[in-house]
Image (cartoon, rainbow, N blue to C red):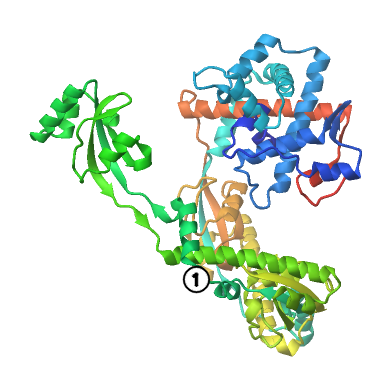
Amino acid sequence: MLQQMRKFAGTWVSSLFLGAVALSFIVWGVADIFRGSADTTAYTVGSTDVQIDAFAREYHNTLRNLGGVVPPGQTKFVEQAILDRMMAGTALENLTNNLGLTASDARVRAQIQDIPQFVGPSGTFDHDAFLRAISQSGYTEEDFVAAMRRDSARSQLVTAIQGGFVMPSDYARALFSYIEEVRAADYIVLTSKALGPIAPPSDMTLAAYVKGHPEKFSTPEYRAVSFASASLADVAAGITVTPDQIKQERDANKSAYDTPEKRDLEQLTFPTEAEAKAAKAALDGGKTFEALAIERKIKPADYQFGTVAGADLDDARSKAFFALPEGGVSAPVKSTFGWVLMHVTKITPGTSKPDDVVRADVQKALADAKMSDMANAYTDAISGGGTIEEAARKAGMKFQRIAAVDDNGFDPNGQKVGGAANDPGFIKAVFAAEVGEDGDPSSTPAGNVYAVKVDGITPPKVKPIDAVRVQALAAWTGEQAAIQLKAKAAALAASINTGSKLDDIAKQLGVTVAKSPALTRLTKDPVLLPPVLHAIYGANAGGATFAPSADGTYVVAQVTGIVHPVPNPADPTYQGGVRQLSNDISQDFALLLAKAIQAKDGARVNQKLIDATVGGSNSGS
């Protein structure tokens, strides 16, 4: 947990302004929470209560650092990491208050003015930029200054705890020796060929195996469903797009359909028109643009502007530059900073998507709007007491029934149901619905709209033994082979550890003894997979061990060598590793102190409120 906390343990200031996406501040679900409860405390440490809006603000700013999206499956981890960080900070703030630590106005002012996000166009602190930035992160000026003061005071305590810590040299050497330890091993690979024939099971044993593994030998769950549907393809096919609509769409979204012509620009600037004209004459006489730049001691980066579009230049330069042929040089043109000559080195023609593409986009947009109207009409009809069939008819949707479908779109005869069942979004909606409930219309990624009602469920049922005998026998035999192979590998390793020779065992089995390369804990090998490496590194010198490898095989290995490298204390890489580990350990000191304070003073988390704030479903108090 300490390592997880450390990932989020940077100061709250850095969490505000490092985000790639500027999201507007939203107190996630807090308004709804307040309607049902008067307790707005997210957590308490000692006598300090922290309100849910402070947690919501931290959650928002962390989301911004993640690009506005929490990685799949990580919501709970992010929520807990933020909570741990905030509670640790509160615990340390309580201690700083008890110790009488504070920060002066001058110190806080200087720290705020040093934050890069508050620098204005002049290169110095800009009060308006400061207000915009903190407002975007949900702070008033008063709140931000107070938070900075607390952070600064807490930093004094943390610096005193962490500052100057260096890992003891003996500990560092031992850790280095452990991490960099090199091993070698001889090994054999056991496959199912090392086993004798596996006697077939009795019918009673096989029947018990089938019963004990219903997930492998049962029919799937089938659902009977009635549903209303509107297909994007069907609705779009009934919509005619006029030339005027195509023109309106193209004009409204030029950048989506038209790519402007672009040109590679070289440009030299002159203080007077006369100098520019003289340079143009030299170019017309055969001098190259590059030679002219060298003569004027201008670096390539200062005259090679790269690719530009017409909108990238002012009107005068754009008009002159885009009238030139490839390789052409303009006459002198007056610009903001003097007179310029422009050279076209490459022309990339513009492109325009055909009207058919625009027509399809307009057709889809109109179809989406119509389907939204149909969904609303369906909702009104079903809310008024109509049946799903009646509501579908009033909304202009199709009504259908499927007698039985599984979660892969097949019927009980193993045939593909087809139609709506080919849409994964439809199947997902069917198997998420409650029996007998009139579902609301929802769209699928395929662009179709469905409102489903599950009429009944046929639960999974274990198939008769005769129907699955072949599959069950193969599965049982494979499982027994795996059990016996593991037992044989364990017995062989034990035999070597009591005096048998790996070479003799290999001859008996008809396999070859392989010799490993020099191994590290991170070695990647198609046979010596991580479980095998872990086993080898857990064995004594000369000892044997075993572990599973690829494709159901087992490796029996005997350690033949162990080397513990001795670090060079003067090696910069080693010194950097020691500094990094020392820093990591010192951070643990502060986090452990925060945990100790929480244990001593008491801490309480309103988990239900926090989960609701981030949209979670976990409950607690």
Q: Secondary structure at mark 1?
A: loop
The picture quadrant where one finds residue 458 is bottom right
Can residue 213 be seen by looking at this rendering? no
Give residue 307's position: percent from left, percent from top: 32, 41
Screen quadrant of the C terminus:
top right
Residue name at image x 20 percent, y 46 percent? 325
State the residue lying farthest toward the bottom. Answer: 466
The picture quadrant where one finds residue 593 is top right
Screen quadrant of the N terminus:
top right
Q: Is residue 176 left or right of residue 340?
A: right
Give residue 132's position: percent from left, percent from top: 63, 28
Can residue 229 be seen by looking at this rendering? yes
The picture quadrant where one finds residue 374 is bottom right
- Total number of numbered labels? 1
Label 1 belongs to which residue? 510
State the residue lying farthest toward the front. Answer: 244
Q: Is residue 277 left or right of residue 300?
A: left
Give residue 111's position: percent from left, percent from top: 62, 17
Give residue 76's position: percent from left, percent from top: 73, 47
**Foreground residue among 223 and 439:** 439
Residue name at image x 51 percent, y 63 percent? 361
Above or below, 621 against 275 in this view is below
**Foreground residue among 599 and 417:** 417
